[in-house]
Amino acid sequence: MTAHTSSASASRRGRRPGTNTTRQAILAAARARFAADGFTGTTIRRVAAEAGVDASLVMQFFRSKNELFAAVMSVPADALTHFSDAFAGSDDGLGERVVRAFFEVWEGDARTSEPLMAMLRGAIVNEQANEQLREFIQERFLVAAVTSDNAGADDALLRAGIVSSMLVGLVVGRGVVGVPTLTGVEREKLIKLVGPAVQSVLAPTLSPDEGERLGR
C-alpha cells in the first residue's frame, strides 16, 4: 500500500470536520437505532456505520452505550407544550385533544418521537430508560392534567394516570408490538375511536346529585 493510499484511508476514518456536526450526526443515527431496535439491540458499531464514522470516534464523544443512550433521550422542551395546550379550554372535546396531542408527540417530529420510542423500548431492560419514561409521564402528562380545572387535584392525578396508561399501551401496540389492526388504521380514526373513552375518564358526565355534591 502506498503512502498516499494509507493517508487517504486514514483521512476517511478520521474525525469529521466540525466536532459539533459529527456529534449531531452520531446522535441522529443513535436516536433512529434506539427507537427501532431498543437498547439491547443497538450497537455502537451500527450507530457508527450509519453516522459515517468509526466506532472509536463514537466512544470519544460518548464513553459507553449508556452515556450515548442518556444523550439520545433528551426531548425538546417546546414539543411538550402539546400536552398543556390540550388540557386548556373547556371539557368539550377534551378527550380528542389529549389523544391527538399524545400522537403528535409520540408519532410526530423525529426529534421528539425517536427519543420517546427509545425510552419505551429501552424501559424493559434499562433502568435509566425506565426512570426517564416514568419522569416523562409523571412530570409532563400528569402535571398538565392536575393543573387543569377538570377535577380536584387528587382525582385529576388518578384519572390522568389511567389515561396515560391507556395511551402508552396504544403506542406499544402500534409502534412496538405492531398489532396489525392498530398499525393498519389511520391516526385520525384512532383519535375518533379513543377520544370518547379518554373523555369519559378525564371529564365524566356527572349526575345532578354528584354535581351538587362536588359544587359544580
Image (cartoon, grey):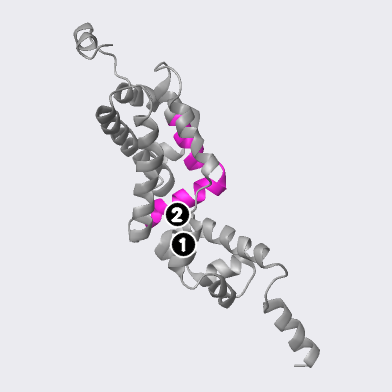
N-terminal label among 2 and 1: 1
Q: For the residue marked with disc 1, what is the amino acid? A: Phe
Residue 179, image quadrant: top left
Callout 2: helix, strand or loop?
helix
The image shows a total of numbered marks equal to 2
Q: For the residue marked with disc 2, what is the amino acid? A: Ala
Residue 175, given in percent of the width and then of the height, sits at 43, 45
Question: Would residue 192 be seen by someone viewing this image from the given angle?
Answer: no
Q: On the rendered structure, is 163 left or right of 38?
A: left
What residue is shown at x 38% (from left), y 26% (from top)? 148
Assess whether mark 1 and mark 2 are in contact (beta carbons under 8 angstroms): yes
Q: Which residue is mark 2?
A: 118
Residue 113, given in percent of the width and then of the height, sits at 50, 46
Q: Start and end of the magenta stretch?
A: 99-122
Q: Main secondary structure of the magenta part?
A: helix
Mark 2 surroundings: few (<14), some (14-19) or many (≥20) residues within 10 A: many
Residue 30, given in percent of the width and then of the height, sits at 53, 61
Q: Note whether 66 is above or below 11 in the view shown.
A: above
Mark 1 surroundings: few (<14), some (14-19) or many (≥20) residues within 10 A: many
In the picture, the quarter occupied by the C terminus is top left
Callout 1: helix, strand or loop?
helix
Question: Would residue 72 be seen by someone viewing this image from the given angle?
Answer: yes
Q: Which residue is mark 1?
A: 69
What residue is shown at x 54% (from left), y 68% (from top)? 46
Q: Residue furthest right?
A: 4
Residue 123, given in percent of the width and then of the height, sits at 35, 55
| Alpha carbon separation for disc pair 2 and 1 | 8 Å
Q: Nearer the viewer, mark 2 or mark 1?
A: 1
Magenta-colored stretch includes residue 166:
no
